[in-house]
Amino acid sequence: MEETQNTEEKILAAAEEVFMKAGYDGARMQEIANKAEINKAMLHYYFRSKDKLFEKIFDGKVKHFFPEISEELDKNQTFIRKVDFMIDAYISLIIRFPYIPLFVLNTVNKDNGASFITKLPISLIKKISGEYMAALEKGEVRKVDPFQLVISILSMCAFPFVARPIIMQAGNLTKAEFNQLMEERKAELKRYLRFILVEGESRI
Amino acid sequence: MEETQNTEEKILAAAEEVFMKAGYDGARMQEIANKAEINKAMLHYYFRSKDKLFEKIFDGKVKHFFPEISEELDKNQTFIRKVDFMIDAYISLIIRFPYIPLFVLNTVNKDNGASFITKLPISLIKKISGEYMAALEKGEVRKVDPFQLVISILSMCAFPFVARPIIMQAGNLTKAEFNQLMEERKAELKRYLRFILVEGESRI
DNA sequence: GTCTATAAAAAGATAGAC
DNA sequence: GTCTATCTTTTTATAGAC
């Protein structure tokens, strides 16, 4: 944390924290003001309304909903290695920002959430599908439904984090142990994907 | 809908609808009253407070977060067939009650959500793990981490529904097309699980 | 049990002094 | 830019007549 954090930055940091944990409906402007160590009036002075402040936070965080791997996907690598990279990157990302998945999912599921959906870097999904198709042409991978495949990878990476309290209860885990489980999960998922995409191919 | 739906039932039906879509924080007692076609005072007459009403709804719906397949798991079947059954049952369940996953996940992720977690039928997770271990002993399945496996199955079934707006956007789908995709997903996931657990040698 | 009216509290937003 | 004080609206909850 910087010593020279100005008011706007303090508000943004506080708002991020509160909106992430409580969501839009659960967030309170008073709590944001307290956390930023300023008064409510300042929130409106800088950002006019709760809506506007929320949008600022969403815009800043939405890029962390999907990992930035576009560059990596362009490299000359096998598809399975690209998937490896994606799994590592995605799980690492969410371990760092564990509140983002539920935050984003709630926002886009709200009645007025349609406008937020367009802000997501959805192109990643199509890009991975495209990479898969190219790999299929080369005979690198088995034939599966590309869209379902991408959904499955994202699901297996992201869902455990939104279900964290349940998983912690089921496995009787501490927060540290949960993170450890997610670290180990990377290798496990990479194994799964090999089974799904390449091993046993000769029998099909 | 029954003609002879009394006030309490009307309130519960309305509350369920509103809480499911909006969550606790987003739900408004006035909206529940409107939907139930009674006035707000009645809500408090029957349920005292918003908290109490919410808890009633949660208690009634939480059983639908996991499918009821305990009986099926006890049958003398291969593990892979039990997983098949679970995938079909789970996806069918969520297609019927699409709001439940996000509703439950939000509730257990809230600061005061700890008390709600214990109400989930978490034993299912351990039961499936146990079934897996038995199958492993018999040489029916490959060695994987049982806990990670169960998490993966649940993830692949449930996550697409909480990410529905994103998936619909990415695939340019209508609601009906999305449900169709989820129906097809059953078969795709069953294939995946065969690749993961028994390689290409699955004999049905 | 059901209603209208209203209290009580919470929460977003603004006015105006400095 | 920052603050205190206040307004307005929303929302939960209750009182009391019928």
Image: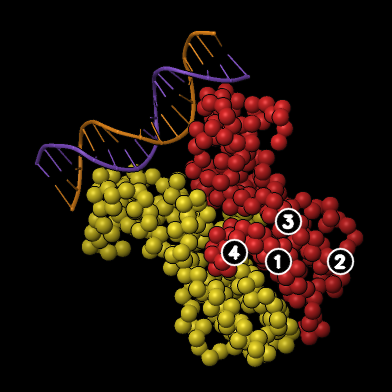
Chain colours: A red, B yellow, C orange, D purple
Residue A143 relative to residue A10: left or right:
right
How far apart are the alpha carbons under marks 2 and 4? 36 Å
Which mark's residue is nearer the viewer, 1 or 4? 4
Is the residue under label 4 in contact with that under label 2 (CB below 8 Å)?
A: no
Residue beneath label 1, please? A185
- N-terminal of the pair, mark 2 or mark 4, is 2
* CB-based contact (under 8 Å), mark 3 and mark 2: no
What distance separates the C-alpha of mark 1 from that of mark 4?
A: 15 Å
The three-letter code of the residue at mark 4 reads Leu
Q: Amino acid at mark 1?
A: Arg
Task: Mark 1 vs mark 3: tell me if same chain.
Answer: yes
Q: CA distance from mark 1 to mark 3?
A: 11 Å
Q: Which mark is residue A78?
A: 2
Q: Earlier in the sequence, mark 1 or mark 3?
A: 3
Q: Secondary structure at mark 1?
A: helix
Q: CA distance from mark 1 to mark 2?
A: 21 Å
The residue nearer to you, when weighing A106 against B169, is A106
Read off the chain for label 1.
A
> Is label 1 in contact with label 4 (beta carbons under 8 Å)?
no
The answer to whether residue C9 is left or right of residue A3 is left
Graded by Cα atoms within 10 Å as few (under 14), some (14 to 19) or many (20 or more), the crowding at tag 1 reads many
Q: Chain of mark 2?
A: A
Res A32 → quadrant: top right
Do the dots labelled 1 and 2 sit on one chain? yes
Q: What amino acid type should be assigned to the residue bearing mark 3? A: Ser
Can the viewer see residue A163 in this picture?
A: no
Q: Secondary structure at mark 2?
A: loop
Measured as percent of width and height from the top left, residue A15 is found at 59, 37
Q: Position of residue B83 (x, y in %)?
A: 58, 79
Pinpoint residue A94: horizontal percent, then vertical percent.
68, 54
Q: Which residue is mark 4?
A: A173
Residue assigned mark 3: A92
